[in-house]
Each structure stands twice: as C-alpha cells, then as structure tokens.
Amino acid sequence: MIEGLFVGLLIGSICVFSFLFVQYHQYQVVGRALPTESDGHPKIYRMKLWNTNEVRAKSKFWYFLRKLKKVKKSNGQILAINEIFEKNPTKINNYGIWLRYQSRTGYHNMYKEFRDTTLNGAVEQMYSEMASRHRVRSPCIQIIKTATIPAKLCKRESTKQFHNSKIKFPLVFKKVRPPTRKLKTTYKASRPNLFV
Amino acid sequence: MGFKRYVEIGRVALINYGKDYGKLVVIVDVVDQNRALVDSPDMVRSQINFKRLTLTDIKIEINRTPKKKTLIEAMEKADVKGKWENSSWGRKLIVKQRRAALTDFDRFKLMLAKIKRGGLIRQELAKLKKETAA
C-alpha cells in the first residue's frame, strides 16, 4: 500500500505539471576549472539554478561562475548536474524569492512572495509576474535566494490574506465551457448562465 | 440574491474539465485566489484551478489539510456518496453515464420498451376519451 501511494504520488506530480506550459526545473550544477600544472586541484563550486532544461542550466552555471571566478566553459568542466525535486508537493507553502533584475534604466533588487505547493511552481509564478508587471524577460532575472517562509513572517498582504484556517469565499463568476475542446462550437442556442 | 455555495475547507466540488473530469473532490486547502488543493479517496492530493471546479451543496467537516485516513472517515460520516447519488444533479449524471454506456442491443431493448410504454399510454388515453365522449 505504501509503495502504491508512492507511485501514485509520482504519477500525480507528473500529471499536475503536464498542464502547465513552460516548466521550470531546479538543478544542482557542480563544476570546476580544469586542472593545470600550476593548480592540480582547483576548487569545486556548486550552484542551484532554475531553468527549463539541463542544457540551459549548464549554460547558466558558466554565466554565473564567470562573474565570480576567472573560469570559462572552455577551461572548465561540469562534474555533475542533478535535478532537484519537491519533497512534498501536496503541502502548500509560502515562498519568498529574492531577485535581482535588469530594468530599462538599471539593476534593482526585489523580494516577492508566492503561495504554491512546489518551489518550482513559485519560481514559475515569479517569472510570469515579472514579465507581466515589469516587462522583465527571464534572461534579465537572477534569483538570489529562495526560502519557505512560515506564515508569521510573510510580508505581503496578498499572501497573508490566505492564512486563515476558516477561509471562505464565493466564486463570483462561473466559467461556462464544454468539457473538452472537441465539443467547442462557434454558435450556441442560448446565452450562458454565469451565476456561481 | 446572495451566494449559497462557498469555497471553503470541506466543500465538495465536481471537476468539470480536464483529465479528472466528472470526479467528486473535496477542497482541502486554498492555495491562492485561483487555485485550491483538492483531495479524493482515489486520487493523489493535487492543486486545481477553480475554473475547473463546480461547487456542490455538500460540505463535510474537516480541518485544514487532513490526513488521507481522516478525510475518508469524514466523507463516510457525512455520506457524501449517498447524498450525491440521491441529489437531482447526481441522479441526472448517473442517468447520463448509463445512457452513454448502452450497447446497440441495449438500445434495441430500450426502443421496444418505449414502444410498449407508448402503446399502453395510448390505450389508457383511448379509454378516457371514450368515457368523456359517452
């Protein structure tokens, strides 16, 4: 029964993500400069990144490492790249994301809060929100830090309003649509009823 | 006017779009304005958009994010399945499913039964007409 639940959880998480369009994954990338005669054991660096696939994650690893150390992809090597998965995708968390982004006039820091079941989901929400609210595209965003915030320490009213164990609100507008896209028609016989 | 069905913890809803179409689920927590965490005895707990849910009149008593076992017990206690299958909405859905699952032979039997019923109705009608004419 336990392994059935485990398999079900895996299948469940895959199914949940399949509806969403751009899927951000979290990767751990480990790399170092190539060993030379002067330095036989160069320091190994590890980074946690978010990107859509492994190739892009490796590329982003070198982008950040170049800014920090004197090493490039041509004189370095990636030792490991592993995907990091969410431990408990059935639990809702408040995620705080610190980011640095480039606007039309300069670089700024920002702190945003999101409620989601997984960190990858929160990161994807962040990218969407930055693109819509500030017209900042994903290459211009650097994630400084992410953290799960306990409810007491949340700063934004829009996340704090859901910290209510007896939350209750009506759905004001009913979206009327056929259950599959195949049953969609251009003309309908009657006007829809939008109440609840 | 006024709203009678609220999104709240314990509200039973029907999924009206997507892979889990037609399933009855319980709202176990609210992620944010657009999404809820839903759970059902036969599915993994997952988040779903409110646009894919239609709220029902049934509500069960649970705390926020209960364990699966507690949820199943609460659903049994409130007799969600029974209430649903006896409600007019639930009954209509069951009839729909039955009709969709008919084989050609079943449809043939249905046709014969309809003809028979029509014949009986017309006999009674003819009797009543004769009585009122006479």
Image (cartoon, coloured by chain):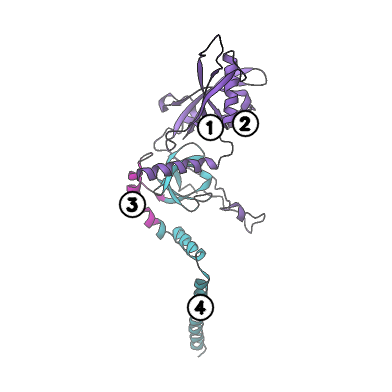
Chain colours: A purple, B cyan
Q: Is residue A41 above or below residue B38?
A: above
What secondary structure is found at the residue carrying circle 3? Answer: helix
Q: CA distance from mark 3 to mark 2?
A: 45 Å
What secondary structure is found at the residue carrying circle 1? Answer: strand
Q: CA distance from mark 4 to mark 3?
A: 40 Å
Chain containing mark 3 = B
Task: Give the labeled residue for mark 4.
Answer: B112
Closer to us: A68 or B102: A68
CB-based contact (under 8 Å), mark 3 and mark 1: no
Chain containing mark 4 = B
Q: Is residue B38 above or below residue B105?
A: above
Left or right, A159 with reference to A127: left
Left or right, A154 with reference to A101: left
**Numbered disc in front, either 2 or 1:** 1
Disc 4 and disc 2 on one polypeptide chain: no
Q: CA distance from mark 3 to mark 1?
A: 39 Å
CB-based contact (under 8 Å), mark 4 and mark 1: no
**Amino acid at dot 1:** His
Closer to us: A47 or A170: A47
**Amino acid at dot 3:** Glu
Q: Which residues are magenta?
A: B58-83
**Numbered disc in front, either 4 or 2:** 4
**Numbered disc in front, either 4 or 1:** 1
Evaluate whether residue A112 shows in this view: no
Task: Give the labeled residue for mark 3.
Answer: B76
